Amino acid sequence: MSDGRLNVGQVALIGLFVTALTTAQLTASKVLAIPLPSALGELPVVGASIIMPGAALAYAVTFFASDCYSELYGRRPAQVMVNVGFAMNFILLALVWSTIAAPAANPEFAGKFADVLGSGTNIIAGSLLAYVVSQNWDVIVFHSIRDLTDGSFLWLRNIVSTATSQAIDTVIFVGVAFYVAPTVLGIGQALPQNVLLALIVGQYLLKLLIALVDTPFVYAVVALLGDGAKAEDDGWVAD
């Protein structure tokens, strides 16, 4: 039987994970252009600003939540959370598209609603494939390093797992959404290779920065909730 603090912490991390994941799915179609500081000038490949889908910011939070969850509750519970989250993406899409397809009292507003929430098929395909591969990789690498270091160096497994999984996520998402899907499905136009490379590098630089910045927050969450949980490969138990 778990105590109240364990329940609150576990539910809070799952809630953060699902909230960030849902937000990422709904904001994927907006392309952001984040200007670099003038002191940096233009970076090779990237240029003067980092171009990325709006989902990148929210999606980075899912890795923070999954790393905290992995550390506190174990590998298998973390993988269950990740894969259930993957399935929930389809429920989200079904609910959104069923609402779009339903008769509208205001057809003009309905058109705007569909434009905003109806993410393109290419974006959806890229994000779902990137998600299921990169999130599972994140959990596997996190616990592999944890086992090799006998539970020490939380900062190392947080940074390495997030940095490598974000690289996988970025390459798969950009490649599928902006090149493979348009080419194979014939929906939209495939982007030139130099633009694809700029998208990949720009997104990854920001995601890598987030991975470095969120490490102290991972320590804080684990310290706050760690007394109430014991991570084990076959599940979790209360102390």
Image (tube, rainbow, N blue to C red):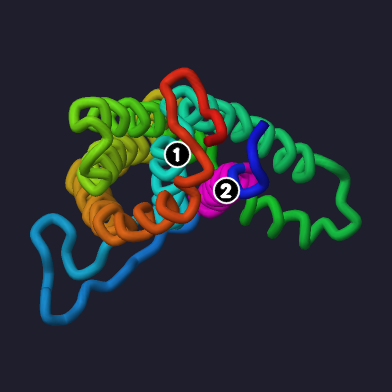
Place of residue 127 in the rendered image (x, y in percent of width and height, measured from the top left): 45, 37
- In-image side of 167 versus 189 (left or right): left
Q: Is residue 164 visible?
A: yes
The residue most toward the top is 234
Tag 1 residue: 72
Q: What kind of secondary structure does the magenta stretch mostly adopt?
A: helix
- Secondary structure beneath dot 2 equals helix
Magenta span has 26?
yes
The residue most toward the bottom is 38
Quadrant in which residue 67 is drawn: top left
Q: Looking at this view, is 230 or 235 the one in front?
A: 230
Q: Is residue 25 visible?
A: no
What amino acid type should be assigned to the residue bearing mark 2? Gly
Residue in the picture at 33% in, 37% down: 169
Q: Looking at this view, is 182 or 2 the one in front?
A: 2
Q: Quarter of the image containing the N terminus?
A: top right
Residue in the picture at 24% in, 48% down: 155
- Secondary structure beneath dot 1 equals helix
Q: Is residue 37 above or below residue 26?
A: below
Q: Looking at this view, is 65 or 146 the one in front?
A: 146
How far apart are the two marked residues, 2 and 1, measured between alpha carbons? 10 Å
Q: Which residues are magenta?
A: 7-29
What amino acid type should be assigned to the residue bearing mark 1? Leu
- In-image side of 36 versus 12 (left or right): left
Tag 2 residue: 9
CB-based contact (under 8 Å), mark 2 and mark 1: yes
Q: Looking at this view, is 160 or 126 the one in front?
A: 160
Magenta span has 18?
yes
Q: Is residue 175 above or below residue 220?
A: above
Place of residue 154 in the rendered image (x, y in percent of width and height, measured from the top left): 27, 44
